[in-house]
Amino acid sequence: MVFLRRSDGKVLVQRRSKTKETFPGSYDSSCSFHVRFGETYDEAARRELVEETGINSQLTYLGKFAHFDPPENEIVAVFASESDKVVRIDLDESSVMEFWSKEEVDSIVDGKSTSPWLRDAWKLLRDSF
């Protein structure tokens, strides 16, 4: 997972496309990805950040956690990135992308329909920004 932050401190959170097989329409990180065979977590994160947002910026690795929520059973790596460039939305992945303050993301995570891994990753990420 990658969380993109602007210089004003707001974090990009997306709504998953309603056509997604798992958790359609749920709030999610700035971008999420699966690592391809032979690819590192860092390479996969860079690839997906560009594919899903059009942003190519430096990544900071924050950590990993295990996630099991059927049908998902994964090791999730979490990265942060910062950019003020204009975000391009990939409509195959997301229906909406918006920048939110930490407190607004707290509210989304606490009370909205989110991907379960967003809740876990936000705990890891929140205080590092």
Image: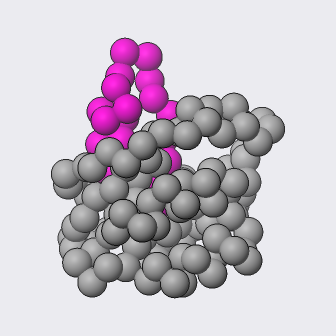
Q: On screen, 67 above or below 28?
A: above
Percent position of residue 33, x then y: 48, 41
Look at 31% across and 35% down and name the residue there: 42
Q: Residue at x 37, y 79 (%)?
A: 10
Number of numbered discs on residues: 0
Q: Is residue 5 magenta?
A: no
- Say whether residue 4 is left or right of residue 121: left
Q: In x, y percent, where is residue 23?
A: 73, 54
Can residue 43 be seen by looking at this rendering?
yes
Which residues fall within the magenta stretch? 29-52
Is residue 91 visible to the viewer in this orientation of the structure? no
In the image, residue 46 sits, relative to residue 91, either above or below, namely: above
Q: Quadrant of the C terminus?
A: bottom left
Horizontal side, residue 43 vs residue 14: left or right: left
Residue located 52% across and 66% down the image = 14
Q: Position of residue 116 (x, y in %)?
A: 69, 54
From the top left corner, tell me how far across and down residue 111 is, in percent: 73, 77
8 vs 14, nearest the viewer? 8
Q: Which residue ends up furthest to the right in the rendered image?
A: 70
Give the quadrant of residue 30.
bottom left
**Residue in the image at 63% along x and 76% along y:** 108
